[in-house]
Image: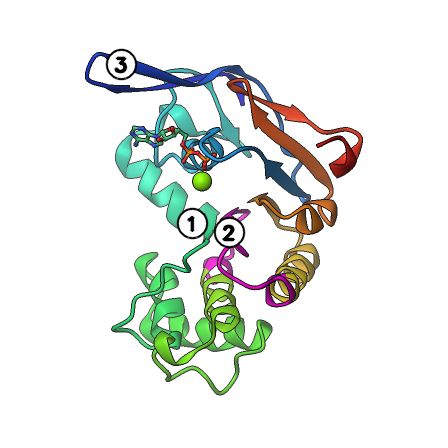
Amino acid sequence: MNGIGKSYRSGERQQVIFKDLTATFASGRISAILGKSGAGKSTLLNLIAGIDRPDAGSLRVGEVSVATLAEEDLCRFRRQRIGFVFQSFHLLPVLTVEENVMMVPELSGVSPAEARKRAVSCLADVGLTGMERRPPELLSGGERQRVSIARALASDPDLILADEPTGNLDGETGRAVMDLFTSLVRKRGKTVVVVTHSLDIASACDALFEVRDHGLFPLDHGVTSW
Ligand SMILES: Nc1ncnc2c1ncn2[C@@H]1O[C@H](COP(=O)(O)OP(=O)(O)O)[C@@H](O)[C@H]1O
Ligand SMILES: [Mg+2]
């Protein structure tokens, strides 16, 4: 990210979120983002994924210049290169666990049979074999988050963005889900950016950043300096 500027305008009022933000997340690493509520952490993930556009500056994911992509190319970029994990899971209640995961490869044009195979394999990776045909509402919070991790991995994306993935889980469940997540992404050499309030989770990451004062700053001394 290079010289990123982002403001929101509501009526007369202009709210500056980022001003001249420059930062790099190393590929193949897990980076944690800390910061106060309302500082702009989710906005930053949205900018990286091209869900939101910066007012100024440039930003690149691998060789793709995200900020200048046309809407249609952005959609394809997101579908193929980015995986999302959200605090509130974002599973579709009318679909089974397996269908929730299948949906991602299917949207990329993979045949239903192949998509199902991928879903079954990704669900096995997160330890949910046997749960494929259940509706998400019959799963615990930790299990639901594992479904959403399987879904994030189903398109084999380069970059995974996780916005407070353990925010709705108790401490122990959150840790277990995060351990599984990090071991999976490390094994596959994925790049991960995770927003978290948990110092426990942040300290297990390779690099730490803080969103503050309209920018993103490395925390070189780890969580003790936060
Ligand atoms: N689409 C939007 N329109 C207007 N304001 C927004 C929008 N998205 C976020 N904001 C505002 O930007 C600020 C940062 O939000 P957010 O990135 O969600 O913070 P965080 O994730 O760090 O809690 C907040 O004040 C929020 O209200
Ligand atoms: Mg947020």
Q: Residues within 10 Å of mark 2 (few under 14, many from 20)?
A: some
**Residue 18 left/right relative to 200:** left
**Disc 1 to disc 2, how far (Cα)?**
6 Å
Seen from the viewer's position, the closer of residues 49 and 144 is: 144
Q: Residues within 10 Å of mark 3 (few under 14, many from 20)?
A: few
- SS class of the residue under badge 1? helix
* Magenta stretch contains residue 169: yes
Give the mark nearest the N terminus, 3 or 2.
Answer: 3
The image quadrant that residue 188 belongs to is bottom right
- The three-letter code of the residue at mark 2 reads Pro
Q: Position of residue 35 (x, y in %)?
A: 57, 33
Contact, CB < 8 Å: mark 1 with mark 2? yes
Which residue does the numbered mark 3 point to in the structure image?
13
- The three-letter code of the residue at mark 3 reads Arg
The nearer-to-camera label among 3 and 1 is 3
- SS class of the residue under badge 3? strand
Residue 135 got which mark? none
Q: Position of residue 43 (x, y in %)?
A: 42, 32
- The three-letter code of the residue at mark 1 reads Gln
* Magenta stretch contains residue 67: no
Which residue does the numbered mark 2 point to in the structure image?
157
Residue depicted at 46% across the width and 47% down the height: 82
